Image: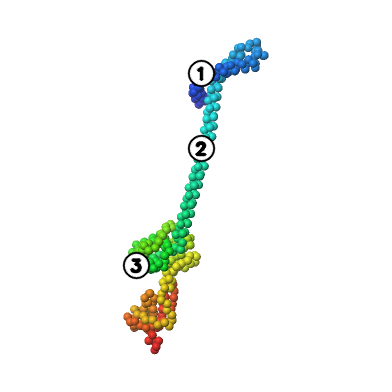
Amino acid sequence: MENTLNKTQQKAKGITQLSRFNIWVRIAFAIIFFILGFNLSRSAFFMELPFFGYHTVWEVLISAAAGLIGFYVFPLFLISAQYWIEATINKVVNEIVTNFWDQQSRKIQEARREKQKRKVEEEDSKRKSDWEHAVVLDTSVLVDGRVVDIVKTGFLDHRLIIIQAVLDELQTIADSKDKLKRQRGRRGLDVAKELKKHSKVVIPDIGANGKGVDAKLVSFAKEHKLKLMTMDFNLNKVAQVSGVKTLNLNDLINGLKTIMLPGEAIKIKVVQQGKEKEQGVGYLPDGTMIIVEGAKERVGDEVDAVVSKIIQSSAGRIIFSKVSEQLRN
């Protein structure tokens, strides 16, 4: 059944293809093939070797067969040849066009990649230029707030970098139920806002990679070869071990305090009693604590004292002294 259907379809296809040829063209092909067949059969077969003495009958039969070939078969051959030539041309053209567009697409993609690469390189170059000598600030520096005064005086005129994780930590502290923590968090956010008015502040978002804020600060500063300003003792040590240069705000402030030497006379107001026996406590204008031996009962009075020793650390400086009257006695 299927074979019969295929044969029927092929026959219909052949009839459709033949219908493309004008009937007069097919008749012309038939006449040409008839004449060629007659001449070929006459000259090649029957002129010298007649078939049972008859020439014309067989010549006519062969010529008629040749005419039928010219009328039916040769047009189909021409159509098939046309289809083959068209298919070959289409295939070649398609391959040429496809190869052309593939090459153009690759060139476009390469151009885009090159453009993107140049853009990234330009951004990296610009960032390196902008961030040269920049200083990364941690949470403790913003909560302390004295960095604003340093910036205002012009001693710190480099670009300041506050990573987004630090601001997020300040926001978390500001939302704390503890009143003291809440005040510290809000002060840190206010300091960050104030710094933007007086300095060039960059706030990069380095993403959430599972690290804590301190680890992000150290990693960021190390990656971009930047200095880290902190007042956190532990963070300061970790950064130094990691090869990151640190700026301790306490060291700067202590370095700017009034220099005193043992044996130097000072005048100090005693504001409270000390922890040890007979000690009073006072403060210099820069906030330096003065321990005055023998001034326990002199709270509220201004006494003359002599510096005995000085203890210096990253946490601050403490000056020990004795009341001048006791030294004279």
**On the image, which quarter does residue 78 sit in?**
top right
Residue 117 drawn at (x, y percent): 49, 51
- Tell me what residue is drawn at x 44 percent, y 68 percent: 247
Q: Residue furthest bottom?
A: 329
Residue 242: assigned label: none
* Vertical side of 124 occupied by 237: above or below: below
Looking at numbered disc 3 in the image, what kind of residue is underneath it? Leu
| Mark closest to the chain's N terminus, 2 or 3 | 2
Looking at numbered disc 2 in the image, what kind of residue is underneath it? Val
The residue identified by callout 2 is: 97
Residue 53 or residue 250, whichever sits in front: 250
Which quadrant holds the C terminus? bottom left
Task: For residue 15, say whether it is visible.
Answer: no
Circle 3: is it few (<14), some (14-19), or many (20+) Cα within 10 Å? few
* Left or right: 322 in relation to 71: left
The residue identified by callout 3 is: 180
Q: Which residue lies furthest to the right in this view?
A: 48
- Tell me what residue is drawn at x 36 percent, y 76 percent: 285
The residue identified by callout 1 is: 24
Q: How far apart are marks 2 and 3 (CA)?
A: 74 Å
Q: Circle 3 — which element? A: helix
Residue 40 drawn at (x, y percent): 62, 17
| Mark closest to the chain's N terminus, 1 or 2 | 1
* Vertical side of 61 occupied by 151: above or below: below
Looking at numbered disc 1 in the image, what kind of residue is underneath it? Trp
Residue 158 or residue 76, whichever sits in front: 158
Q: How far apart are marks 1 and 2 (CA)?
A: 40 Å
Q: Circle 2 — which element? A: helix
Task: For residue 129, say whether it is visible.
Answer: yes
- Tell me what residue is drawn at x 47 percent, y 52 percent: 119
* Left or right: 268 in relation to 62: left
Q: Circle 1 — which element? A: helix
